[in-house]
Every structure is written in structure tokens, then in C-alpha cells.
Image: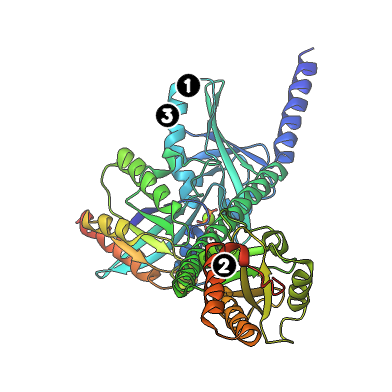
Amino acid sequence: MHKKICMLGGFAVGKTSLVRRFVTNLFSEEYHTSIGVTVEKKILSVAGENVTLMLWDLYGDDEFQRIRESYLRGSSGYILVVDGTRKETLATALGLQRTVEGLLGSIPFALIVNKSDVRDVWEIDDAALSALRQQGWTIFFGSAKTGEAVESLFSTLAHRLLNQAM
Amino acid sequence: MRSHHTRQATQGEILCTQLFVALETAVLERVDQTDTFSLQGTAPAWWSSIFGTTTPPSTVRPGERSPFLKQFLGEAEQGWARHAAGLVRSGPWTERDSHGTTLHLEATALVVDSRQLLLVARLGADFEQARATLQRAREQALRHAQATKLQTRTESRLTTQLSQSEELRDDLLGVLQGLGLATILTDSQGRITFISDEAAGLLNLSTDRTGQRWDQVLSCSKTDRDAIWTRLRNPAEQHDPLTLHLETDNPRWLDVTVSPHPRHNEKRILLFHDTTEIHDLRRLLDEKARFHDLVGSSPSMMQVYQLCESCKKKRSHDWARPNQGK
Ligand SMILES: Nc1nc2c(ncn2[C@@H]2O[C@H](COP(=O)(O)OP(=O)(O)OP(=O)(O)O)[C@@H](O)[C@H]2O)c(=O)[nH]1
Ligand SMILES: [Mg+2]
């Protein structure tokens, strides 16, 4: 079974790094901005069934590049990535969530506040996140650098995709 | 004639093939409205590393190898179905070959002569240049955001520190005023940086004189001024207060001590004590003693003496200096 998952968020929030950590267990401090799309695969065993996650690592959404709606089509779920050290990236993620919901309806997604390894320069407002949790959002705090919450982020979403398919 | 045309057509075909190879572009024609395509002309050098060896005109299903292309074929379908002139572009995407080398590709769907075509091009120098520009723009945006954040944080720290030290200063001023000490604080140039209410009253100053030099504010003789300047230059050397006479509408005798500021070496603290009353009393005692010595204490002389005293009280403000000769 193949499931398409889009990685969405502002630029430099760590979309590529999270996918790389999950697929190859590697991390690089260097920043190479993504242009266009890279599709990575990883097979997960969910409730005794093998699921191939097709992870669409999209470029960061900003004034230079807007997300093409055609890239989102066919997604089973998506991951919103926020950079914990830049509070404006939460607003970008919220905007993208509205776009996806408008286009694909309500499909499973999760939000990760990335870069939890540098909490001393943390900027994200806890109140805003609690409000989202109350709306039923699944929110993780994690780090592509240390690997914190990376596995659980993808496997939680995979479980939800499978539960929905059943 | 016909063979001439045929030769020309063949040469044109060869040129086209070479052109597409030079542009690193694969030309595929859709077979029977399916996901199968036949490779036209010659495959560019990069093709086999991603899509496997394909010898034209053999067929290939590129969507099987590339999930991105598979999705794009769905989008391209609409363009092909319209049979309209015009291009459907995929936008750039990245594939990795078996050696881990990444290739940036872009696909274009179009219809030519009712033939449904798919071009897959490897993006070259232009793409790399655009990428480098975007990379710089984003790095700059990140640096700018970080610098702004740092500035805001420093600013707010300094504002807090400033308000704390302002509060502390106000407290200390309150204490100083409360103690009723007549103090003046001067900087290295002798300019007044602080003057207590008590000092302002004592020196007969009705307006705020901070910023002015102390010697413009203190009306006294040159000798007194010079003595204070000496103390200001060497504040620690003498500890006895200086006595100076204030020559204002309300003349006074003042004792002045000059001390160095405990934290700022170049600053000075001048502390004034009003000793006018002591001076007056001392003078009275002196005079009394002198009257007694000179004329004794016969009742008539005592009367003269008391008359003198009452006159002196009436004109006390004129008696600022002990004028012993009169
Ligand atoms: N400290 C820290 N740095 C991280 C983390 N994740 C990513 N980074 C760094 O953040 C920068 C951006 O990471 P990317 O993964 O390229 O971000 P992206 O969201 O794919 O960026 P775009 O492709 O430009 O949209 C890189 O320098 C990474 O090393 C993390 O968890 N902790
Ligand atoms: Mg990226």
C-alpha cells in the first residue's frame, strides 16, 4: 500500500532534514534550499501491514515560491513543519493548512515544531499551540538534529492514514 | 526532386535529434492514450541512469520509475485531451540515480500534429543559477531575521536595565533629599550633574543649574573659588572642610567638603554645611568679650551696648561680615 504524504511549511524550517533523518537517519547542519519536489520512500510496518510512505518534500512556501496545488493532489495526509526558533513560521503553516483543507478536504495531518534542540532561542507561543490542540490537532515537539519525535511523527500519521483507510 | 526533399527531411530529423540531445531532453510520444511512451530520436546521456536503458523506438513507462512523473501524467492528461496548442509544465523535481547523484528534471506535455508528446529535460546552468540566487535570498532573510531578533532582545534587556537603574537612582535621590544634605555632584570638567534641593536652597538658586560649571553657580570670592578648585583637583588630600563666604542677597558662611566619587574617579561630590549661625554666635561672643574688656559693665555702658545689639539685629542681613573695626 502506498501513501502520499506532503511535507509543508515555510523555508528552512527543516522539512528536508526531517525526511532525511527519518529515511536515512542522517542530519546535516548545512542549508540547501529545496527547489521543486523530491520524493522519498520509506516502508513502515503498521499493525502488521507494510505501508510505503511516499514523502513529498516540497520547497518552502514564501514570497519567492508558492506551493503548486497540483503537487498536493493525491495526498493521503500531510505534515506541517514549524521552526520553533522563528514564530512567523507558525503563521505560514496555518495558512498552508487552510490551503490544503480547501483543496483536499479534511485529511489526516500532524504538526511538528522542529529544532527542539535549541530551546534557548525558542519563540513559539505555547498558548497558540494549546488552542490548536484543543481543536484536535496532533502536535509534536521534535528535532531533525537529535531525532527527537521524528519516528513517532511519521508512524503516528501512518497509523491514522491506515485507520482511516479501514 | 522527390529524393531531394526526402534528403532534406532526413537532415532535418537528424538536426532535431541532435538538438534535443544537446538540450539534454528526452522526447517521448504517448502510445494509445496509455501511460506507455515510445522514445523518439536519441535518448540523452542522463536518461538511462534514471529510467534504464531504452533503445528508441522501444517503449517505456516512466511513471513507474518516478512517482512525481506519475502524478504529472495525470495533470498532463488534461492538456493532451484538449488537443490544444499550449504546454503543461511539471515544474522542477529531483531524482536520484543508483549512484546517489541527484538530477534536476522538468517535464512538459504538449500536442504536435495530434501527437501527444512528453519532453523530459535535465535542468542545467540556468536552473543552478536561479537556485543559487534563491539560496542567497533565503540565507539573507534568515540572517536578517536573526539580527533583528538579537537587536530586539538586546534592546529589551537594556530597557529593563535602564528602568531598573532609573528606579534605583530615584530611590537614592529620595534618600539623599530625605537626609537633607546639601550636595552637588560634578563631572570631570566641573559641570554640575546633580544638585540637591537643600543645596539649591542654600546657594539661593531658583532655577535648575545642572549642566553649568559649579563656579558659575557659587557666588564667592576668587580666593574661595581657587581654594575649591584645588580641592577638586586633589579631593583626597585634605579632609578639613573649606570655609567660604557666599556673596548673595542672603549672605552665608558655608563649610565645603570635596570628596571623590566612589565609583567614577573623575567626578566629585561637594557637601555644604551652613555655618552662618555658628559664625554669628562666635562673633557675638567675641564682641561681647571685647565690650567688657574695653568699657566694663557699668549700667550706662550696658545700655549703650544693648542699643548697639538691637540695631545690629534689625540690620542683621547687613552684618554678614564681622566688621570688627566699627
Ligand atoms: N538546530 C537544528 N537545526 C535544524 C533542525 N532541522 C533542520 N535544521 C537546520 O535548518 C536548516 C534548514 O533545514 P532544511 O531541512 O533544509 O529546511 P527546509 O524546510 O527543507 O528548507 P527549504 O527547502 O528551503 O524550504 C539547515 O541548516 C538545517 O541544518 C533541527 O532540528 N535542529
Ligand atoms: Mg528542503
Picture coordinates of residue B149, whole percent (x, y): 53, 58
Q: Is residue B270 visible?
A: no
Q: Which residue is mark 1?
A: B83
As measured in the structure, the alpha-carbon distance from the residue carrying label 3 to the one carrying label 2 is: 118 Å
- Crowding at dot 3, Cα within 10 Å, few <14 / some 14-19 / many 20+, comes out as few
Nearer the observer, disc 1 or disc 3? Answer: 3
The answer for which chain carries disc 2 is: B
Q: Which residue is mark 2?
A: B312
Q: Earlier in the sequence, mark 1 or mark 3?
A: 3
Tag 1 and tag 2, C-beta contact below 8 Å: no
As measured in the structure, the alpha-carbon distance from the residue carrying label 1 to the one carrying label 3 is: 9 Å
Q: Is residue A43 visible?
A: yes
Type of amino acid at the residue the image marks with label 1: His
The answer for which chain carries disc 1 is: B
Quadrant position of the C terminus of chain B in the picture: bottom right
Picture coordinates of residue B140, whole percent (x, y): 63, 52
> What residue lies at 26% left-to-right and 70% top-to-bottom?
A48
Q: Which residue is mark 3?
A: B78
Same chain for marks 1 and 3?
A: yes
At mark 3, the secondary structure is: helix
